[in-house]
Amino acid sequence: MAAHFMNGPFSRYGLIFSFLTLLTGLTTNAQNALPNVTRDLLNRGPYFRASNYDITPIYTMPGPDGRILGYPYLDTAFARTAVTFYQNMAKPGTKPFTEITDAPVRYNLQANDLEFLVDARTVKAVSGERVRQFNMERNGQTTRFINATEAGAPADLRGFFEQVTDGRLKLLVRHQIYVKKPTYNPALSVGTKDTELIREAVWYASDGKNLTKLTPNRKGLLSVMQDKEAQISAYLKEKKPDLKNPTVLADLFAYYNSL
C-alpha cells in the first residue's frame, strides 16, 4: 500500500491532465454498465440523495479570491465496490437490503460520503455514518475500509479507516484532507490567495475497542504491543526492518498477531 500526497498547486498542464483523467475515468465507468439490480437498490433507497457531482473539476475552478486546488476524494476515479450498511436501506414496503455489491463508488473524504456512479451524469451519495464497511477493488487488489466506530474511535473522529492488517491488533490508515489556507498578505502583496486540499495519511492501531494513533518507530510500536514486548524487541533487533515501508510494517503486525 502506498500513500500519495499532493505537494502543491497544480500547474496549468496538471489541471488539464487531471480533467482528462477524470473524464476518462467517467467514460470507462459509464461503459461498464451498473447492474440493473444495483441500480434498482439505489433508486428505492430513501437515504440515497443526488450529489453535487459535476463532470468538471469543480475543485480547481478559479474564483475572484483565489482558487481551491485539489480534490476531496480518496481517488477521483470510481472503483468497483461492495458496501455493507448498518441498517435496512430500502423504502418501507419494499424488499429490505443492507448490502450493495459490484457498484462504481468513490469516497469523498471531506464530506464523509460514498458516491455511487449510476450513469455518465448521475451520481447518488450516502452518508458514511450509515456504512459499516466497504471493500474497494482497484488494479486487481481489494482494500477494506471500516467505519471509525468499528475501530473504537472517539465520537469526534468520524469517517473510515483503511484496514491494512486484520487480527486482534489491526493496523489502520486514516486518509484525511488537510486544508492549507491562503497566505496572501494584501499590505505586502505577497503569498497566495489559493486554498489547497492536501491528502494525508495517518497510522493507527486498534484492538476493536481502543484506537491509538501510531508513530511507526520502535518506541511507538512497543507502546501498542506491550504484552509481547520481549518478542517484538527481539524481532526488531534481528530484522532491523524499514518501518517507513508500509509492507514491512504490515508484516510486523502479522507477526505480532501470530504470537
Image: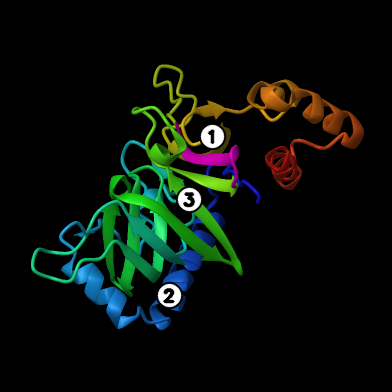
Quarter of the image holding residue 234? Answer: top right
Instruction: Tell me the tag on residue 150.
Output: none
Q: Which residue is at 46% across, 65% downward?
A: 22
Q: Is residue 200 above or below residue 92?
A: above
The residue that label 1 is drawn on is 207
Left or right of residue 223, residue 175 in this image? left
Q: Give the number of callouts.
A: 3
The residue that label 2 is drawn on is 29
Where residue 130 sits: x, y (%)? Answer: 28, 49
Check if residue 196 falls in the magenta segment. no
Q: Nearer the viewer, residue 226 or 141?
A: 226
Magenta segment, prevailing SS (helix, strand or loop) = strand
Amino acid type of the residue that numbered disc 3 sits on in the rendered structure: Phe
* Quadrant of the image containing the C terminus: top right
The residue that label 3 is drawn on is 145
Query: Which range is magenta?
Result: 166-179
